[in-house]
Image: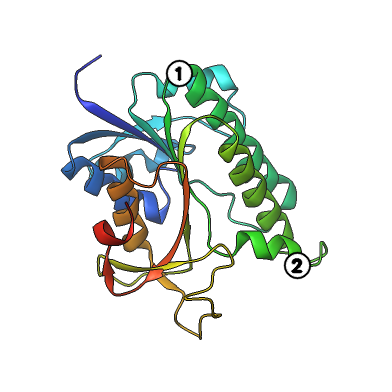
Amino acid sequence: MTDSKRVVIIGGHGKVALLAAPKLKDAGYEVYSIVRNPDHADDVEAVGANPVVLDIESADTATLAGAFAGADAVVFSAGAGGGNPARTNAVDYEAAVRSMDAAAQAGVTRYVIVSYASVGDDLDRLDPSDSFYPYAKAKHGADAYLRKSGLDYTILGPGMLTLEPSTGKVVIADEHANIDGRKPAAGETDTPRELVADVITHVVANNAAIDQTVNFYQGETPIAEAIR
């Protein structure tokens, strides 16, 4: 055990996680990135993080708690990738919930999860036969569980993820994913993955947005001003 600050990222080989890891490292954290595939360890190391090979889909709460021991924060940025409703539920809901319980068990109170802006409305508006419905249900359920978990949580709800570089600036959306009470026009919900990584780093490093759900897109307000 060292005196260094430590963050554990679940879903460490995801695009957002690979962008967030070096930013968290630059903010003074040791970063431990959980990956399922050992072949991904080199990619994790290349961005300055320490790979932890662990399958969150099968790992129990105690095993996850062991992986979180000594961390200052846990960031959940994993996802099943859609296409398989059973696996979507297993990863995006069941594994997420176990990781929340594990964080509490390990004494890690700070927990940040990457969700998406319109998750609440999607669950109500989508027909259960829609192929996207299992994902919306899993993410909505995980978010709801986190709000009641007693952890110092932040739920991040970006919009349409893009590969554009981060501007470091956002616009905050409301609980219905609207901007200033109106439905965003085409393109207004675009959110660079790197911007999501910047927001993760900001909320972790500054203990910002504790017990808050923050829906956001690329905008004109610096992150530090918009998210406190």
For numbered disc 2, what is the local secondary structure? loop
Q: Residue placed at 21% from the left, 17% from the top?
A: 2
For numbered disc 1, what is the local secondary structure? helix
Instruction: Indicate which disc residue 126 carries.
Output: 2
In this rendering, is residue 44 above or below 30? below
Q: Residue placed at 45% from the left, 18% from the top?
A: 106
Q: Earlier in the sequence, mark 1 or mark 2?
A: 1
Q: Residue placed at 81% from the left, 61% from the top?
A: 128
- How far apart are labels 1 and 2 at the CA level? 37 Å
Circle 1 residues within 10 Å: few <14, some 14–19, many ≥20: some
Residue 92 in picture, x, y percent from top left: 61, 45
Give the residue number, with chain letter if any, for mark 1.
106
Residue 58 in picture, x, y percent from top left: 62, 29
User: Which image quarter: residue 161?
Assistant: bottom left
Residues at discs 1 and 2 in contact (Cβ within 8 Å): no
At label 1, the amino acid type is Ala
